[in-house]
Image (cartoon, rainbow, N blue to C red):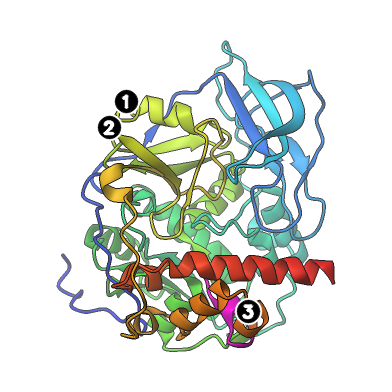
Amino acid sequence: MSSAIVVGPTFRHGVHPSEHKEGTEHLPSQRMPFVSTYVIPLSQHLGAPAKAVVREGERVTRGQIIAEPSAFVSTYHHSPVTGWVRAVAPRRHASGQLMPAIEIEADPFATQRFETRPPLDWSALSSKEFVAEVQKAGLVGMGGAAFPSHVKYAGLPEGAVRALVVNGSECEPYLTNDHRTMLERPEAVLRGTAIVREKIAAEKAVIGVEMNKPDAIEALRSRVEPGSSIEVVPLKVKYPQGAEKMLINAVFGLEVPAGKLPIDIGMVVNNIGTMAALADYFDTGLPLIERVLTVAGPAVDTPANLLVPIGTPVRAVLDFCGGLKEDTKEVILGGPMMGQPTSSLDVPTMKGNSGILAFTETETVRPTEYACVKCGRCAEACPYFLNPSLLGRLSRARRFEDAEEVFVMDCMECGSCTFACPSSIPLVQLIRVAKTEIRKKARKG
């Protein structure tokens, strides 16, 4: 560990779940072999779904645009392989619903090499042209939120951005894909960061990395040029430090007001993986057609960090890792704190998937729920200083309007409250119910 890393800043509240990163943090990323069929959902990012621009039977090449945005808060999708479009129709989505998608059969005789183009002179692009190129690349937040990246860079007034904050925290247990990206591709991370910092005219860029990744901190720091506007900041290990508002608070001691966005206080936040993917696009033309994800958990036979084409069936990824153990009880897409269980292994991996985790009954058994003992641990854990116990009670009583008045919609569903509750009350699940009902009512007008 570098002698300069003694203690790092952090935010108030939060929790300390067991990290469980030892199974994959030292495993280099490897490319998963191509499979026969890929499914690219048209809705795999926040905002409006994309629109298919290919037809059944059409031959496509790796990296070719197959769907275009239907609105500004939307993005392009590209073919992960060379092959043929077999269907443009509803397919099972990671959410469990049938949703519009493009199914592609890979050409078994194609090399599946991406034909690179000369580097794009990003410095010569206007702000609007830069935003258009980022959208064309199909870039989204790769830390899990999958918010279209170009939206964060659009329409920024001159002098509006104090800092670009890059999230290398990777605070979710088990996940190590960002860690491996920082270790294996630090130049790409720094190049993407430098490009965005300059194009949005940020005064500086800060990469926040938790101190349980000293090798990643050193890999980045050793490549930052003297006098650079990029700083690597070691952070204390705590969950949910990767949440953008918590990261800003940890690094700068600033609070994003309730109902506001980071840009309202001059901050733009991006993920490590997004920065590396952005550098790839401007240097080679490679759009977001593949990503590194962590395959781990007690029910996985052979844990790994894999470079997986977008649209690969979850089942195929797990099979490559030796399959699931017989006592597998649950498979989660993402991390154990904020990830979502999947009801089918035949759903595709998507741009925002950071991991595939599998657990046995030992880890997933539901503890007995007891009455609230008014201990206040949920409030002490909540990074947004909400009262999760009150929100849970209001949700159970179906008093959703009352829950909204005490800021239930500000909850980011990190699960810290549920983790901290000694009575095993499913607080975050109750809060999700309340938020869903409030949104339903809002849509009905």
Q: Is residue 67 visible?
A: yes
Lateral position of residue 174 relative to residue 246, left or right? left
Say which amino acid is labelled 2: Thr
Task: Identify the mark nearer the N-term, 1 or 3.
Answer: 1
Say which amino acid is labelled 3: Arg
SS category of the residue bearing label 3:
loop
Mark 3 Cα within 10 Å, few/some/many (few <14, many 20+)?
A: few
Residue 18 x %, y %: 24, 61
- Closer to the camera in the image, 402 or 278: 402
CB within 8 Å, label 1 to label 2: yes
Q: Is 408 contained in the magenta span? A: yes
Task: Identify the mark nearer the N-term, 2 or 3.
Answer: 2
For the point 35% across and 70% down, the residue is: 239
Quadrant holding the N terminus: bottom left
For the point 62% across and 40% down, the residue is: 93
The residue range painted magenta reads 405-412
Residue 28 x %, y %: 29, 40
Please name the residue that numbered disc 3 is placed on: 399
Please name the residue that numbered disc 2 is placed on: 302
Residue lying farthest to the right in this orientation = 445
Residue 168 x %, y %: 39, 63
Task: Identify the mark nearer the N-term, 1 or 2.
Answer: 2
Please name the residue that numbered disc 1 is placed on: 322
Say which amino acid is labelled 1: Gly
